[in-house]
Image: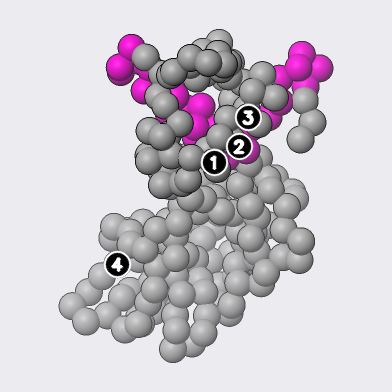
Amino acid sequence: MKKSSIGIGKPTKREAEILQFAREYRQENGFSPSLVEIAKFFKRSVPTIHQHVYSLRSKNLLLVDKGKKRSINALHNHRVPEVMIPLMGIISAGGPIEAIRDPKPIEVPRSMLSLGHDYYALKVSGLSMIEEGISDGDIVVVRDQQSVDDGEKAVAYMPDRNEVTLKKIYREKDRIKLVPANQTMKPFYESNVVIQGKVVGVLRKEF
């Protein structure tokens, strides 16, 4: 990954999360987290976390004093406004997600993301959610989760149709109501729906 002209590299999504965790841990406890504690929080192995820390050091995003315990020190004066998540495919009003060949990471505002979750992006095809500010060609940022609250926008898989759609979700007694945000389109109902993620943001850029 390229470094900027001032010698500060851009972190991956996971690296940005580790930076934020290290800062918050130090603020709460008065000392830095150990590799074991970071690994436990993110449910990853210590060698994997060590690789992330080494990468962050090479990008001048944190300092590590060799030979000292709890020496991981995220640079407090450096803000990371954007992080990278994968653009996985194209989602339309109906039909399977069209996978993108050779998907490339895209930059999203860190403010859209929170620690401890995985995210991905999908390009929207169609106008079924236009009244929620989601237009044809926009990119939606999706948090990977298996449930949403009523009225939230979700990526929903319908096994009986073998289709994936982007709709607002409402639970009824024995069925799920899927509601488009377009007054020209009607809601529809399904008894079998698998939630694949919650929409947490929209990017109006071309990729």
**Residue 143: horizontal and vertical position, in percent?**
46, 52
- The first of marks 4 and 2 along the sequence is 2
Q: Main secondary structure of the magenta part?
A: helix
**Could you say which disc has been placed on residue 170 in the image?**
4
Is mark 1 in CB contact (under 8 Å) with mark 2?
A: yes
Q: Which one is in front, 106 or 22?
A: 22
Quarter of the image that includes the N terminus: top right
In the picture of the structure, the residue carrying the numbered disc 1 is 47
Earlier residue among tags 1 and 3: 1
What's the CA distance linking mark 3 and mark 2?
A: 5 Å
What amino acid is labelled 4 in the image? Answer: Tyr
Residue depth check, mark 4 versus mark 3: number of the one nearer the observer? 3
Q: Which residue is mark 3?
A: 54
Residue 51, numbered label: 2
Q: Secondary structure at mark 2?
A: helix
Please identify the quarter of the rendering in which residue 103 is found.
bottom right
Q: Is residue 43 above or below residue 137?
A: above
Q: Residue at x 81, y 17 (%)?
A: 5
**Contact check, label 1 and label 4, Cβ < 8 Å:** no
Residue 151 drawn at (x, y percent)? 32, 58
Q: Is the residue under label 2 in contact with that under label 4 (CB below 8 Å)?
A: no
Give yes or no for residue 207 being in the magenta stretch. no
**Residue found 33% across the figure and 74% down from its top:** 177
- Ranked by sequence position, the earlier of labels 1 and 4 is 1
SS assignment at label 3 = helix
